[in-house]
């Protein structure tokens, strides 16, 4: 039976989201900002982030797959849902649940840049630098984690645990 070890409480997550939303709102005042949520994991974070922004935004989603039912990235990235909104000459903020190796994020950034946006920046709930393999810049990170496979608040293991309101280290 898997064990769930608490990492972040709901109250702490909410406080982090509010703080990062304030920074983003300030940085993008008078800009046309488009949030691109990375499905499926980032949808909960994106929703809370968007509701806490004080600026108008547009929202779209992208879906890529690299984990499958494993706890580590396969290294193979497959685009399974493309963006639908026009990002040309607009500011784009990629919203991720967790940045681990950075390989998926690097792929997403390159993909988005092909549509000639004005800027592409990154906001992540969790920045897991320990296993970083790609040189990607994280512009906004709510929390830095060092180890463990994390679930809850949108993060999953084989499609389970997304619904948990807090973040846990999953020990299999």
Image (cartoon, rainbow, N blue to C red):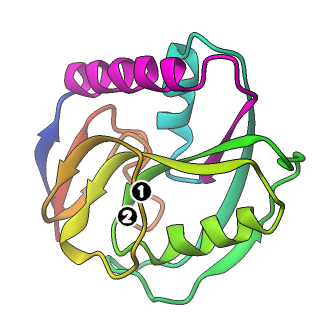
* Residue closer to the observer: 157 or 88: 88
| Image position of 88 with respect to 80: above or below | above
Q: Residue 160 got which mark?
A: 1
Percent x, y for residue 140?
39, 41
Q: Residues within 10 Å of mark 1 (few under 14, many from 20)?
A: few
Percent x, y for residue 141?
33, 43
The question of residue 159 being in magenta is answered with no
* Residue closer to the observer: 4 or 77: 77
In this picture, residue 43 sits left or right of residue 14: right
Residue 131 visible (yes or no): yes
Which quarter of the picture shows residue 15? Answer: top left
* Residue closer to the observer: 29 or 142: 29
Quarter of the image for the N terminus: give it: bottom left
Q: Residue at x 62, y 67 (%)?
A: 108
In this picture, residue 159 sits left or right of residue 47: left
**Secondary structure mostly taken by the magenta-highlighted segment of the chain:** helix
Percent x, y for residue 102?
41, 72
Q: Residue 157 got which mark?
A: 2
Q: CA distance from mark 2 to mark 1?
A: 5 Å
Residue 1 visible (yes or no): no
Q: Which residues are magenta?
A: 10-38
Q: Residue at x 42, y 39 (%)?
A: 163
| Image position of 34 with respect to 150: above or below | above
């Amino acid at each position: 039976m898997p064990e769930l070890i608490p990492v972040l409480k709901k109250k702490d997550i909410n406080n982090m989201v509010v703080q990062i939303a304030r920074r983003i709102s300030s940085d993008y005042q008078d800009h046309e900002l488009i949030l691109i949520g990375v499905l499926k994991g980032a949808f909960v974070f994106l929703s809370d982030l968007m509701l806490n922004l004080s600026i108008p935004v547009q929202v779209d989603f992208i879906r890529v797959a690299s984990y499958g039912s494993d706890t580590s990235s396969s290294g193979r990235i497959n685009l399974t849902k493309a963006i639908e909104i026009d990002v040309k000459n607009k500011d784009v903020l990629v919203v991720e649940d967790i940045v681990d190796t950075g390989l998926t994020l690097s792929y997403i950034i390159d993909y988005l840049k092909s549509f000639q946006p004005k800027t592409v920046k990154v906001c992540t709930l969790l920045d897991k630098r320990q296993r970083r393999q790609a040189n990607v810049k994280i512009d906004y990170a709510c929390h830095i984690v060092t180890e463990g496979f994390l679930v809850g608040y949108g993060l999953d293991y084989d499609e389970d645990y997304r619904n948990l309101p807090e973040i846990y280290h999953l020990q299999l």
